[in-house]
Amino acid sequence: MRILAIDTSCDETSAAVTEDTRVFSSIIWSQASLHASWGGVVPSLAQRMHRERIDFVVQKALSASHCTLSTVDAIAITQGPGLAIALEVGIAKAKELANKYHKPLIAVNHIEAHVLSPLGCPKNLEFRIKNLEFPCLGLVISGGHTDLIQINKIGDYKILAQTQDDALGEALDKAARMLGLGYPGGPILEKFSREGRPDSYPLPTPMLGREKEDAFSYSGLKTAFFRLIEREKPLTKEKICNLAASFQDTAFNHLVRVLDYAVSCQQSTVSCLLVGGGVSANIEVRKRLRNLCRPLGIKVLFPYSKKLCGDNAAMIGVAAHFKALRGGFVEITAPLDRDPRMRL
Ligand code: KG4
Ligand code: ZN
């Protein structure tokens, strides 16, 4: 089934054409530079930019895959979670196209799409992993979520751990802002971290010894980091690099410790960990997760391209493929509404 997928959940206007798990085209028009001067996403600006850009992005995705709206079989759209007034734009467009071209509509959960994004593969590959054995684990590390998920089978999920406060990407964004490094902070912090020493400043690892609580927490670390920066002012380039490296190191340590504990509690052996979300593009976090999983015999799968880590419509197409296999089409298009707090 060839799917035209659309995502407007936050500050990326994105459309893609996919077939099963293969990505034929993926267009992402980021608004990050427009929101940067505000230090974060401004919902009304995001909505306006989605409205202005959506037709162009959809056309680009179709032409890049040599498809037309007549030759796609279904339309997939992010229903939630995300920014309400941003989601609204994509949903209205998907409904309009589904009605006009008589295509079935598939409403996708954005978090499920991040979890399944590592299964997406380039057009010339048949699949990314031949037999995914269940249960396996999923980890979504993004600006809005830090979710560790048990995947009993595709479509059947159990949350094992969630953040109590900030998401990992959000914490990295806030740390970068405190250092005056701009938005989005995760990739900038990663760049500065490469030139810094992670052990230069001792920061408290969140929830040390409390891994049994199956939760992530970044707000205490954020406060400790703020106080540390105040003490270290005025900041030099060297200090910024060391501070960035220390924050990133502590934040990732916490992630890995909770994951380690959760894996050790799994009753059946887990053979695979699927990792998605914007932070999964980070080289250091990839290294840490691989180092944790290798001795345990767990294969770690990240999206094949960085373009599939952050928000993108290709992952919506991949998740929609699996949803279509279980008959998950929208029965009546008109009442389909955004669900900003949609749960997995
Ligand atoms: O998945 P995503 O694009 O949007 C949400 O669904 O939230 O994730 C965005 C988050 C931001 O916090 C951004 O700073 C972070 O992902 N991010 C990174 C990197 N690239 C994006 N964090 C660390 N290292 C990166 N290379
Ligand atoms: Zn996302």
Image: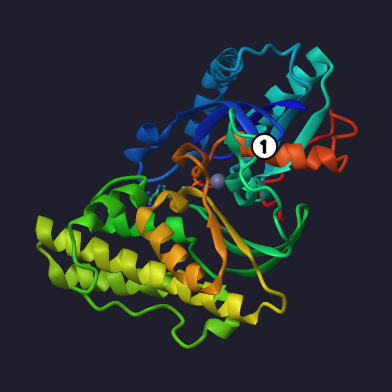
Where does label 1 land, which residue?
A: 21
Task: Residue at 63%, 65% (x, y): give it.
Answer: 271
Please indicate, yes or no, whether residue 235 appears anywhere in the rendered image.
no
Query: Please, which colouring scheme is shown?
Result: rainbow
User: In terms of depth relative to the viewer, which is nearer, 46 or 116?
Assistant: 116
Task: Residue at 49%, 36% (x, y): give it.
Answer: 11
Q: Residue furthest bottom?
A: 209
**Residue 257 to residue 104: above or below:** below
Residue 105 as seen in the image, left or right of residue 170: right
**Residue 243 to residue 117: above or below:** below
Q: Quadrant of residue 133?
A: bottom right
Residue 111 as seen in the image, left or right of residue 249: right
Q: Check disc 1 and give the amino acid type.
A: Thr
Cβ(mark 1) to ligand 2 < 8 Å? no
Q: Position of residue 240 (x, y in %)?
A: 17, 59
Q: Position of residue 170 (x, y in %)?
A: 44, 56
Task: Residue at 32%, 68% (x, y): give it.
Answer: 249
User: In terms of depth relative to the viewer, which is nearer, 33 or 47?
Assistant: 33
User: In terms of depth relative to the viewer, which is nearer, 302 or 60?
Assistant: 302
- The N terminus - image quarter: top right
